[in-house]
Amino acid sequence: MKLEKYSLKVKNELLTDVSVDFRQGRISHLLGQNGVGKSCLAKSFLGRYQYDGQMQYNKDSMVVIGSYSNIPTELKVKDVLSIASGRCKKELLDELGYRLKIELIDTHSKLKRLSDGQKQKIKLLYYLSCKPEVVILDEFTNALDKESCKEIYSFFNEYVKKNNLCTVINITHNLSDLEYMDGDYYLLHNKKIDKVQDKEQIIKLYVEGD
Amino acid sequence: MRVEWRRGIRNYYFILMVAVNILNVLLGYILLTTIDKVEKVTFLNLCESVYTVYTQFGTLLFSSIIIMQFYNDYKEKNVVFYISQKRNAITYFFSKFFVVLSGTIAGTLFSTLLICIPYGELSWIPVLFFKLEAVMVYYSIIMSTIGFLFENFLVGFFINFFAWIIGIVVSDISVGFEMFAYYDASSTDYAKFVEFLDGKKYILKYLTYVGFNYCFNMAVFAVCILLIFILRKRWLKNGI
């Protein structure tokens, strides 16, 4: 997935003339301080904000999974599974369900009755069931306990391995994401997105700030 | 569409709609016996009183239930889910509106039966149902549009309330502005309904007139759809 001369303005100029290429088959971690425009970037993919420049990706095969992409909580788990089954082959759904341990969740429960970790798993199963080419995760481990986080990290490591044509961009504040999921590292600062060579360097840059 | 039906059932929308419609009938009866001091409530008294409740209190009674159908999606950030279902602002509005409308049909049917069955006036069911439902269709269009356009529930609720008040004031200026409070008790439409109850019009002739109510509703619907199309970006702004 490529951004070319991408500029984004939401009240203030957030990103200017950004050109970056996120690799397929890797998790691209995108870090940045509060207010630099990480979530606005993700929302611009959904059409929420207008941008200048070009984004090269298949718009019909992109999902954004964040706190603003919830599934209606009146639905039951079995309803979501039924909707998801209409979007993909049974084998894919079974595999996603197996890797996310969906069998441990009562399928007759409404989503509103589930824990945050269970809701997040159902959300991942639903959005990934369309076999997207681009997955954007926006602070997706927020509000999850350590155990749930680890399960989801492990799931994504496997997912990227199996779907090596898929581009995963992980917008995060949580340094544990970097610890448990190997990938590429990008820092959003000074209205640019810079690739950083390794994990230690990006943690240092992020913790120290500009 | 199936998702919307399930949601409507599970968030008690249909039950609430039926309950408020039944409440309207009870209010109509209570107002007759308390404020109007009617000792023996006749069928025609009750029809007029209940219709008055629908037209005078409907804005307050139904707006919260209908606006909430849209507000919940904005509050819970469900719009991306609908985008993933290949919906856009217009198709989303239509699916929601269809469920809202189904709820009003169920509710109006209950209230019509509650008025007619105790008096054994079953032949009045069609005309009374279509007349009350015409008012409910109008509410559904206006309140759904407001619910769609405003992210904040209270803002939506009060805009709907003030639009209703302003409509009454504007319609009072001239008969030409009656469309702004088409179903209000001060309107010609209301007067014609009372005339009908007084026996000055035959059922068939009046049913034709009720047909005009639906034509008016369709014109309002067309204007609202145009407004939603123009302001379709608000859907993303409100829900993401």
Image: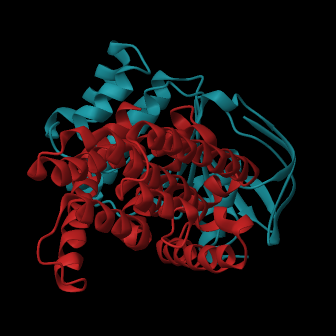
* Screen quadrant of the C terminus of chain A: bottom right
- Horizontally, is A58 left or right of B71 in the view? right
**Residue A121 appears at what percent x and percent y?**
32, 43
Q: Is residue B16 above or below residue A129?
A: below
Q: Nearer the viewer, residue B23 or B234?
A: B23
Q: Nearer the viewer, residue B160 or A46?
A: B160
> Chain A is which colour?
cyan
Q: What residue appears at the point 30 percent right and 26 percent down from the top-left corner?
A: A82
Viewer can see residue B76 = no
- Horizontally, is B224 left or right of B146 in the view? right
**Residue A149 appears at what percent x and percent y?**
33, 53
**Residue B184 appears at what percent x and percent y?**
51, 68
Residue at the limit of the structure toward the front, as seen here: B200
Please name the colour scheme applied to the rendered image.
Answer: by chain
Q: What residue appears at the point 33 percent right and 14 percent down from the top-left corner?
A: A90
* Screen quadrant of the N terminus of chain A: top right
Viewer can see residue B33 = yes
Rendering quarter of residue A88: top left
Q: Nearer the viewer, residue A160 or B227?
A: B227
Q: Is residue B235 above or below residue B85?
A: below
Chain identifier, colour red: B
**Residue B197 appears at what percent x and percent y?**
35, 56
- Horizontally, is B228 left or right of A116 in the view? right
Query: How many marks overall?
Result: 0
Rendering quarter of residue B124: top left
Q: What residue appears at the point 66 percent right and 46 percent down from the top-left corner?
A: B219
Q: Is residue B122 above or below residue A131?
A: below
